[in-house]
Amino acid sequence: PTGKTSLQSYLEKMQEAKNILLVHNTFIGEDDIAFTKSPIQNHQSAIFFCLCPNANQYIEKALPPIDLLREQNCNIVLGTDSLASNWSLNILDEIKTINKNFPLVPLEEMLKWATINGAKALQMDNKLGSFEKGKQPGIICLSNDLNNIKRLV
């Protein structure tokens, strides 16, 4: 009855939040994205769009509009959701799904979504999310040949 989407209805109630994590985003459109960037939204740079593509396919057989989110320079992060709505909690599986369905998205960009962008969304980028002195990168070397990393996705 308000003529607003759920995002538009709730986002204006979160003006005090430092970071807002919008999860799934399968129904988000240009109007909602524009709303997150409008001048009345004081926290526009602190809005993160969390994509869980395998959960989206598991639940509704749909994917978020990744091309649109990229076009609009949205802060994108990757998640896995839970085993209640996903067959895997492996972030590499999420990257593989995006790569399969959006092959023009560079691997380097997806890795940022899975690492530093997520750390920024959780306000932990001073400790996690990148290889820098004093940070905890939390990575496991799966192969001695780092040239094979692209084969993972």
Image (cartoon, rainbow, N blue to C red):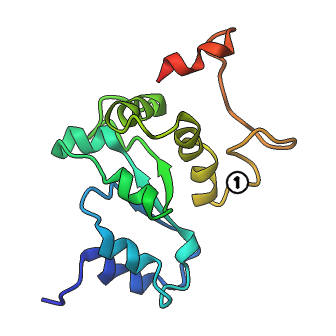
User: How many numbered discs, if any?
Assistant: 1
Q: Is residue 71 above or below residue 62?
A: below
Of 41 and 21, the residue lying toward us: 41
Judge left or right: residue 93 versus residue 101. right
Q: Quadrant of residue 42?
A: bottom right
Judge left or right: residue 135 versus residue 46. right
Q: Position of residue 24 (x, y in %)?
A: 33, 54
Q: Is residue 34 above or below residue 99?
A: below
Residue depicted at x 57% and y 38%: 111
Q: Is residue 144 above or below residue 117?
A: above
Q: Is residue 19 visible?
A: no
Name the kind of residue labelled 1 in the image: Asp
Q: Quadrant of the N terminus?
A: bottom left
Q: Position of residue 61 (x, y in %)?
A: 17, 41
Q: Is residue 100 above or below residue 47?
A: above
Judge left or right: residue 144 versus residue 103. right
Residue depicted at x 59% and y 52%: 117
Q: Position of residue 48 (x, y in %)?
A: 49, 62
Q: Is residue 98 visible?
A: yes
Q: Position of residue 72 (x, y in %)?
A: 45, 65
Residue depicted at x 66% and y 28%: 139
Of 114 and 65, the residue lying toward us: 65
Kindly identify which residue carries mark 1: 125
Of 102 and 115, the residue lying toward us: 102
SS assignment at label 1: loop
Work out which residue is located at the far left of the displayed protein and give it: 1
Work out which residue is located at the far top of the displayed protein and give it: 144
Q: Quadrant of residue 100?
A: top left
Badge 1 crowding class, 10 Å Cα cut-off, few under 14, some 14 to 19, many 20 or more, is some
Judge left or right: residue 61 versus residue 78. left
Q: Quadrant of residue 55?
A: top left
